Image: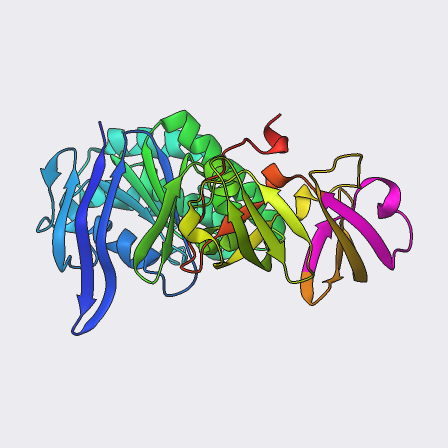
Amino acid sequence: MAEVRLERISKAYGNVQILRDIDLDIAHGEFVVFVGPSGSGKSTLLRMIGGLERISDGRLLIDNRIVNNIDASERNLGMVFQSYALYPHMTVRQNLAFPLRMAKASAEEIEAKVKEAAALLQVDHLLDRKPRQLSGGQRQRVAIGRAIVREPKVFLFDEPLSNLDTELRVQMRVQIAKLHKQLGNTMIYVTHDQVEAMTMADKIVVLKDGNIEQVGTPHDLYHKPASQFVAGFIGSPKMNFLDATIVSAHQDRVEVRLETGVTVSLPVDADAQAVGKHVTLGIRPDDFRAPADSEDDLLVELDVDFVEHLGNATYLYGNAGAASLVARAPGLTAAGRVEKIGLAVAPSDCHLFLPNGKALRRLRAPTSWN
């Protein structure tokens, strides 16, 4: 087993608070991704788990053992960093063997584990090369292999792909995901790239200003964001936000009025005290569609400024009144020149956020779930 539990973990440098009261449970075998903007505390949190940063307050448990004061070398963790940290004068074979030599493993054990890790990561044909003779992706695989040979309980990855080009990043995402499936170890991965988080994680932890904003599956964070920050951070292109006011609240819906004067009834949970509040209406670019015969739909007329063709999708950038919007082009409009277009969105696909940024709970499943 390799469970990791954080209980009210905090980190401060003098009077500067970096992380505040972090509570988190990571189950054995989970692939958990810490994601957030620069300065959110995600790398600091990972480094505290790894024993590279002192914990200011709270408890860190690995397999129900408190490890706050246990050295990094005794926590049985494998760490992979943004910099490959390979020894340039050593071959791939020697780099992979180094942790085992330091642990005084036998020559037979070292040879067997090096061969096994090299084959798993498909670098067995590179064992006699030195790091300068490898590509960035090959170097990163060797760095991962050096962690694998120690057979750690938990792998820690700190933005390991940020130095790679786009194609290599995609390849390495697949490689790490396959590795997790094959080994079954607990993995904790830090990135600022929400695409990496969405494609690799079993569970995502979104951090902002040293606090956890939301923990959930990629599906939950995309379709059920707990806050406007999460809604805007997860998803590409990002969610559209429109200013609105709640004009009435009922048991199973609220009616909101946009700045353009258009009103729409949304199936969200709100009480009568919300009436009159200024709120934010959120719409994902992919949730727009061509207008249909539905009186409930929110209709938007978009003045198009720019059309972005991505091959598999086309996105329209423009304005609806004073608001800037991005919408995935519906139907055949993707092929032609567009200056103005009518769009529609189902009320169940809309999100509503209070002035404090918290999301109102949606009472009907989005149409994308049907």
Relative placement, left or right, of 49 versus 238 is: left
Residue 125 shows up from this direction: no
Please state the extent of the stretch shown in magenta in the rendering: 325-344
Residue at the extreme bottom: 15
Relative placement, left or right, of 260 versus 143 is: right
Q: Residue at x 23, y 58 (%)?
A: 20
For the image shown, how many numbered marks are present on the structure?
0
Of residues 238 and 248, the one drawn nearer to the viewer in this rendering:
248
Residue 22 shows up from this direction: yes
Image quadrant assignment for residue 245: bottom right
Q: Residue at x 47, y 59 (%)?
A: 277
Relative placement, left or right, of 127 versus 323 is: left
Whether 96 is drawn above or below 369: the answer is: below
Residue 239: give x, y in percent of width and height.
59, 52
Quadrant of the frame with the N terminus = top left
Residue 61: give x, y in percent of width and height.
15, 41
Relative placement, left or right, of 28 versus 339 is: left
Residue at the extreme right: 336
Residue 63: give x, y in percent of width and height.
16, 33
Residue 343 is a magenta residue? yes
Of residues 171 and 297, the one drawn nearer to the viewer in this rendering:
297
Quadrant of the frame with the C terminus = top right
Of residues 72 and 13, the one drawn nearer to the viewer in this rendering:
13
Residue 336 is a magenta residue? yes
Residue 213: give x, y in percent of width and height.
36, 51
Report the coloring of the rendering. Answer: rainbow
Q: Residue at x 44, y 52 (%)?
A: 274
Of residues 157 and 243, the one drawn nearer to the viewer in this rendering:
243
Image quadrant assignment for residue 31: top left
